Amino acid sequence: MPSFIATPVELADSVRAFMDSPEYWRDAIGSHPKYFVHVEGRAEQLFGLSKFCAFRDISLEDYVTGARNTTGGGTTQKHIARVCGKEWTPLKLMPRQIQNDFREWFNELTEGKIGIDDICLLTVKLKAKPKTRIKRIVSPEELQRRLAAQTNIGHIGEEIALAYEKDRLISQGATKTIMDLQQVSLVNTAAGFDIRSAYKKKIRYIEVKASKSIDGAIYVSPNEISTLQKLGKSAYLYIVHVTDTRKRTGYVVREIQNPFEFGQETEWLSPALFMGRPTSEEAKE
């Protein structure tokens, strides 16, 4: 279990760690967030989920994939209040500018789908930035740029996987006129898989996961896990390494059949994330 913060400065560092990982914000806050830490500096207003910020020296990725279940929200909230010597304050009683800053950030994050009437803040004021800080605040513009880049990599990965699957079917004797290959993601992004491939009564429901790093962590949503579990042996994960986004090139690193089979234990699987490392032979190809 990660250790708790011991000083307001460590708490502020945790808030900055939270702000630096926008790709995990939505999964971290869940559906009923209530307590957030606010760091008020000379030139920045930062916000972080209290259950994460109570820990020190932990990434938001590690929190989302396991640490958030190690302790309750009441414990972390009381610890933060004790370390800072302050009480939690309802958002509606905070200074107007802080309210506005939080509302703008939170509503953009949740698309206005989660209410903020019950949210409370605890403010940490710092006269200067800690020397340990090396990461910058992520602006809404930077967040949109990152999300767009991730989406682009996903699209390229699907193109590569689709071409790979066509070649695989052709190698088995299929022709373009008789193979049944559909890029499902173009018509339903919530299907839980991206490609449906059928030939000679053999069907593959393929979820594509792409990354520019050959061993990078890849996000798998609860819907995708649930869908692939239900599809059983017809379910496949194609892990794609995108080598050049401008040329839209790359290759399928691995095919994994029935990746989320009930009861199975795998080294690469953790809740919501997996590592797509190739075997030594695959890496040589």
Image: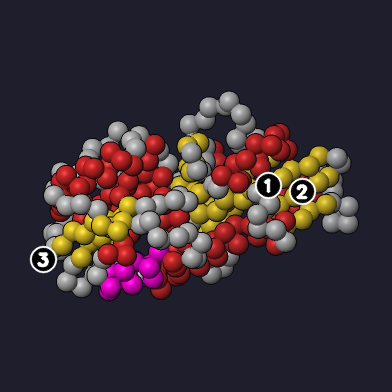
Residue type pointed to by label 2: Ser
Mark before the other along the chain sequence, 3 or 2: 3
Three-letter code for the amino acid on which mark 1 is drawn = Ile
Give the residue pinned by disc 2.
197
SS at mark 2?
strand
Boundaries of the magenta span: 96-106
For marks 3 and 1, give the CA distance.
52 Å
Residue positioned most to the left: 127
The residue located at (77%, 56%) in the rendering is 182
Would residue 236 be seen by someone viewing this image from the given angle? no
Residue 164, position in %: x, y?
Answer: 68, 52
Q: Is residue 54 visible?
A: yes
* 123 left or right, relative to 243: left
Foreground residue among 279 and 200: 200
What secondary structure is the magenta-colored segment mainly? helix
- Are the residues flagged by discs 3 and 2 in contact, CB closer than 8 Å? no
The local secondary structure at tag 1 comes to strand
Q: What's the residue at 41%, 73% (across, down)?
A: 141
Q: Nearer the viewer, mark 3 or mark 2?
A: 3
SS assignment at label 3? loop
Callouts 3 and 1 close, C-beta under 8 Å = no
Decide which of tag 1 and tag 2 comes sooner along the chain. Answer: 2
Tag 1 near tag 2, CB within 8 Å? yes
Q: What residue sits right under mark 3 in the picture? A: 127
Quadrant of the image occupied by residue 89: bottom left
**Label 1: which residue?**
206
Which is more toward the observer, 236 or 272? 272
C-alpha gap between disc 1 and disc 2: 8 Å
